Amino acid sequence: MPDTDLLRERGLRVTAPRLAVLDALSGRGHLDADEVLGHVRATLPSVSVQAVYDVLHALTGAGLLRRIEPAGHPARYERRVGDNHHHVVCRGCGAVDDVDCVVGHAPCLVPSSTSGFAVESAEVTFWGLCPTCRQAG
Amino acid sequence: MPDTDLLRERGLRVTAPRLAVLDALSGRGHLDADEVLGHVRATLPSVSVQAVYDVLHALTGAGLLRRIEPAGHPARYERRVGDNHHHVVCRGCGAVDDVDCVVGHAPCLVPSSTSGFAVESAEVTFWGLCPTCRQAG
DNA sequence: GCCGATACTTGAACCATTCCAGAAAACATG
DNA sequence: CATGTTTTCTGGAATGGTTCAAGTATCGGC
């Protein structure tokens, strides 16, 4: 479905900055706000920092983007939504990649005792070193 | 083991602020830097904000504290280390509680495909509502 | 094409955290 | 216990990612 229709479907107005943000994240996944801004400005040089934050917020709220916040790194955004996949984060450079599914020990995904919390979701983040940082030592 | 010995064992100097931070986190778990500062100043009123951050860093680096960084909330610290347990975070107030890990050692989960990353640990965070926030609606 | 609601621009503020330089304290040594 | 070296603490300023506020431009139903 074209991005234009995706936006309308969620009751969001179609604007150039929104289309540009969606385009910036297409196929490139896991960009932070600053990187998104860079891509957007390649075609729309006058877009403001806040516009990008507003758009990222709106699209995330509408379920068109997913926000990832790895500890110690700025938030990143991706278009892959709705499938609850997981992520590997490089503890060197903060690079993020997708992990389709998790193997083994299901009990770890169902909390044993919830201390009265009403648990809604489980988030799994793997930490390690990306190929580049591994070589750099 | 007394905190004094714990510090020396890791080659860390024994100072009043460090003992106070360890004491503040004893049995109270999951405090953020500001809360730690509050407890520390109850006995050492002149301790600076930066001293608390320095101490939290030093103790975390030495493996005496574990740092938790729930997305969208300031970092929290706890004394329970070395057992790879997980956490439930309240998406209302940010309160954190422990969730025991069935496996016990890291990583308790393994990604299906690692995209060339050398994975070292898996972090599981459960999101939900704490009893208080649940009542508040 | 007009009008009201929504989105964008500019500019300033925010907060957790870090950086810096200098003063103070810890502890190995004599 | 006096000394010197090294680490840690104080105080103040700065940082960076993100958000708030007020006004202007744009979208899209009528």
Image (cartoon, coloured by chain):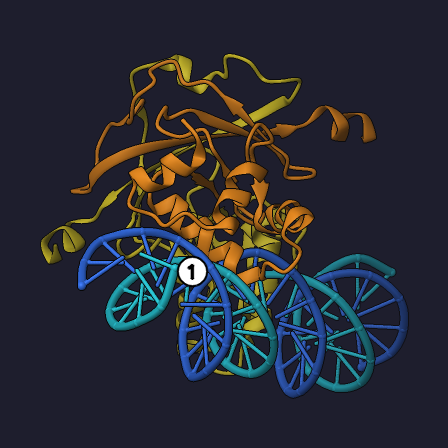
Chain colours: A yellow, B orange, C blue, D cyan
Q: Characterize the local packing of mark 1: few (<14), some (14-19) or many (20 or more) Cα atoms within 10 angstroms.
A: some
Q: Specify the quadrant of the image occupied by residue A104.
A: top left
Determine whether, in the image, residue B23 is placed left or right of residue B111: right
The spot of residue A19 in percent (x, y) is 51, 63
Q: At numbered mark 1, what does the secondary structure look like: helix, strand or loop?
A: strand
- Front residue of A130 and A84: A130
Q: Name the residue under label 1.
A: A32
The spot of residue A136 in percent (x, y) is 12, 58
Residue pushed farthest left? A135
Up the image or down, B10 lies above or below A58; here it is: above
Q: Which residue is drawn at 33% across and 31% down?
A: B122
The spot of residue B75 in percent (x, y) is 52, 47
Q: In which quarter of the image is the C terminus of chain A?
A: bottom left
The spot of residue B115 in percent (x, y) is 19, 41
Q: Label 1 amino acid?
A: Asp
Q: Residue at x 19, y 42 (%)?
A: B117
- Front residue of A127 and A61: A127
**Chain assignment, label 1:** A
Q: Residue at x 37, y 41 (%)?
A: B7
- Front residue of A91 and B26: B26
Q: Residue at x 69, y 39 (%)?
A: B93
Up the image or down, B83 lies above or below B64; here it is: above
Determine whether, in the image, residue A50 is placed left or right of residue A132: right
Q: Specify the quadrant of the image occupied by residue B119.
A: top left
Q: Is residue A14 visible in the rendered structure shown here?
A: no
Up the image or down, C9 lies above or below B96; here it is: below
Up the image or down, B24 lies above or below A117; here it is: below
Number of numbered discs visible in the structure rendering:
1
- Front residue of D29 and A29: A29
